[in-house]
Amino acid sequence: MFMKTRFFAIGLILMLVVSACGDYNKILKSTDYEFKLKKAVEYFEDGEFVKAGTLFQELVNIYRGTSRADQIYYYYAKSMMGQKDYLMATHYFKSLLKEFPGSQYSEEAQFMVGYCNYLLSPKPRLDQALTKEAIQSLQLYINLYPYNERVDEANRLMDEMKDKLVYKSYLNARLYYDFENYKAAVISLDNSLKEYPDSQYREELMYMLLKSKYLLAVNSVQDKKQERLSSALDEYFSFVDEYPESQYRKEVDKFYETVADLLNYDQQQETNIN
C-alpha cells in the first residue's frame, strides 16, 4: 500500500512538471505579447528568474520604443539579478537610466547600478575599477535622491568599499617594502599616505616609510648619502611627533641615533646654539 501511494505521488509530480513545462513552452511560442508580459511578471514574482528572464529578453525588442519599454528593461534587469548575472543587470539598469531618465524606475535603477557593482567588487588584492564605479554610482544616487530611505544603505556600502580601497592601497604600498626594494617602497608608501591620509594603517605605513628611508640612506652611495640621511631624519621627526607612544618607538629611536651620528647632527646642533 505504501509503495503504491509513493509511486502515485511521484507520478503526479511528474505529470505536473511535464504540464508546467508544456505551459511554459506554449508561452514561449505565443505571439500574444501582452499575455507573455503578464506571465513573465508572474514568473518573476514567483522567483522563477530564468523563465522570467527568457521571456523579458524577447520582450525587450518587442516593446522597444513603446511606453512599456522602461518596465521591460526594469524587470529584465531584476531577473538578471535574480540569476546573479550582475553584469547584465547593470547593463540594463544603465540602459533604462539613459533611455528613460524620467521613468518611475529611475530611482531604483540608479541605486541598483551601484549595488550590482558592489556585488561585483572583487577582493582587495585584485583590480578595484568596479569598486570605484560602485562608489561613484552610489554617490550620484545620494546626490539625486538625498532624502530617500536607501541613502543610509548607500552610505554603508560606500564606507565598506572605501575601506577596501584603503586596504588595497596599503597592500600596494607595502609590496615593495616586503621585497626590500626600498627606493620604490618610499614612493609607494608616500603615495598611499597622500591618497588616504586618514588611513587606519597610517602608523604602520609611516613606520615602513621611515624604515625604508633609513635603510636606503645607510646603504646609499656616497654622493646621495647625506641627502637621504637628512630625509630619513625628517621622517623620524614627523613620525615621533605624530606617534610619540608608538609601539615602534624604541626601534625608530635607534634609527635616529645612527642617522644623527652619520650626519654629526648633535654636533651641528651645538654649533648652531653657540
Image: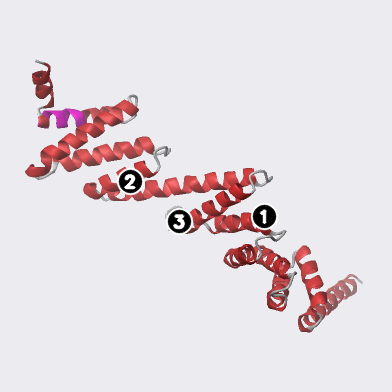
State whether residue 85 appears in this view.
no
Residue that label 2 marks:
191
Amino acid type for the residue under numbered disc 2: Asn
**Sequence-first disc among 2 and 3:** 3
Q: Give coordinates of residue 44: x percent, y percent.
A: 75, 66
Would residue 127 be found to the left or right of residue 217 on screen? right
Q: Give coordinates of residue 152: x percent, y percent.
A: 63, 43
Residue that label 3 marks:
128
Would residue 252 be found to the left or right of residue 63 on screen? left
**Sequence-first disc among 2 and 1:** 1
Residue placed furthest toward the right: 1
Residue found at x 11% / y 37%:
226
Identify which residue, 24 or 32, lies in the foreground: 32
Amino acid type for the residue under numbered disc 1: Glu
Identify which residue, 149 or 255, lies in the foreground: 149
Image quadrant in which you'd find residue 234: top left
Label 3: element kind? loop
Quarter of the picture containing the C terminus is top left
Residue placed furthest toward the top: 274
Residue 257 lies within the magenta run:
yes
Residue 15 lies within the magenta run:
no
Residue that label 1 marks:
107
| Magenta-tinted stretch | 255-262
Residue 217 vertical position relative to residue 69 in the rendered view, above or below? above
**Sequence-first disc among 3 and 1:** 1
